[in-house]
Image (cartoon, rainbow, N blue to C red):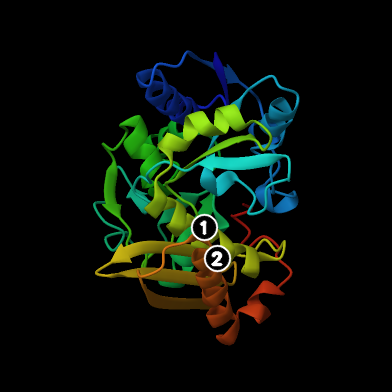
Amino acid sequence: MIRIGSRGSALARWQAEHIAAQLRERGYSVSIEILVTTGDRMQAPFLQVDAKGMFTREIEEALLEGRIDLAVHSLKDLPTELGKEFSLAAIPERADARDAFVSVRFNSFAGLPQCAIVGTSSLRRHAQLRGSRPDLDVRELRGNVDTRLGKLEQGQYDAIVLAAAGLDRLRQTELLRERFSSQQMCPAAGQGALAIECRADDAATKGIVAALDHTPTRFAVTLERAALAALEGGCQVPIGIHCDPAENAWRVTGVVARPDGSNILREQIEFDTGDNTMDRARQLGSTVAERLFDRGAAALLAIDVGAPSENFSA
């Protein structure tokens, strides 16, 4: 019996069941253990806490204690550096990495009226929304997907921005009006990808899940996470990194911004697809970070982040 650890939200359960179904198709018996994480319990705004690992810490503890054999995460929730006790054993093929514009009343982002109220839980999205439309009233939006959609339908927001992959996976796309390009809204590193984490010394489980690994996705997210690691330095600064295939090339978009969106650095680079090893992915991620530093990212990364506006705190 393979025991999968997961958070309890509808999306986390879907992700765990998705991986469980693939393992069952290969003849394995699978059970799912639901675990509550710090991020699930936390009520304080994200900017007031150390966000690293807040959605994974308790699940990793269960792995170490042998209560579960593997964990299924949203990759963007995983810290860029795993503890030596753990292994990122498989990264399945990525879903849509883009962010989604969701609204009851408005059919497009461009169609929002002046001073419209837009909800998001992400400082990265907040900065890019404000950079594109300084007139918007961008406010904090917490909770799982159902909670966020409910607040939108109750009229608390004119629009909200969510990850497209989550809406697609839960088949809750009725109010999805537009998918932002990576130039409009650069995604978070690893967005849309799942991560299967195991104990580093558990060769049997690693061997079982290895068949679920998707090499092009692993290359892309390895590059993204390497760039994020080089940029982040523990700072809670809006950072977006996205790598996708272009014709005979990898196209990488990087964004570093002030939290209020008043200064946004954007960089887009194309790399040939000749050598797609993970070492090269890490090297290219470092190159993307260096280009952003050359553009002045260090000054933005040094900013002491407070709440970007009186209405937004995450």
Q: CA distance from mark 2 to mark 1?
A: 6 Å
Is 127 drawn above or below residue 138 in the view shown?
below
State the residue at coordinates (71%, 22%).
66
Query: Residue 235: percent from the left, percent from the top?
Result: 70, 64
SS of the residue under disc 1: helix
Numbered disc 2: secondary structure: helix
Counting residues from the N terminus, which is met first, the one under dot 2 or under dot 1?
1
Q: Position of residue 250 (x, y in %)?
A: 36, 68
Which numbered tag is attached to residue 17?
A: none
Q: Amino acid at mark 1?
A: Thr
The image quadrant where one finds the N terminus is: top right
| Position in image of residue 117 (x %, y %) | 44, 53
* Tag 2 and tag 1, C-beta contact below 8 Å: yes
Depth order, front residue of 161/221 = 221
Judge from the rendering whether residue 160 lies leftward or rightward of residue 1; answer left or right.
left
In which quadrant of the rendered view does residue 205 lie? top right
Where residue 141 sits: x, y (%)? 53, 44
Q: Is residue 101 visible?
A: yes
Q: Is residue 71 visible?
A: no
Residue at (59% x, 18% y) in the render:
33
Q: What residue is pinned by disc 1?
A: 222
The reply, left or right, for residue 231 in relation to residue 248 is right
Q: Name the amino acid type tagged 2.
A: Arg
Mark 2 crowd level (few <14, some 14–19, many ≥20, 10 Å Cα): many
Relative to the observer, which residue lies in front, 270 or 169? 270
Q: Which mark is residue 282?
A: 2
Judge by depth and name the residue closer to the eye, 176 or 66.
Answer: 66
Dot 1 alpha-carbon crowd within 10 angstroms: few under 14, some 14 to 19, many 20 or more = many
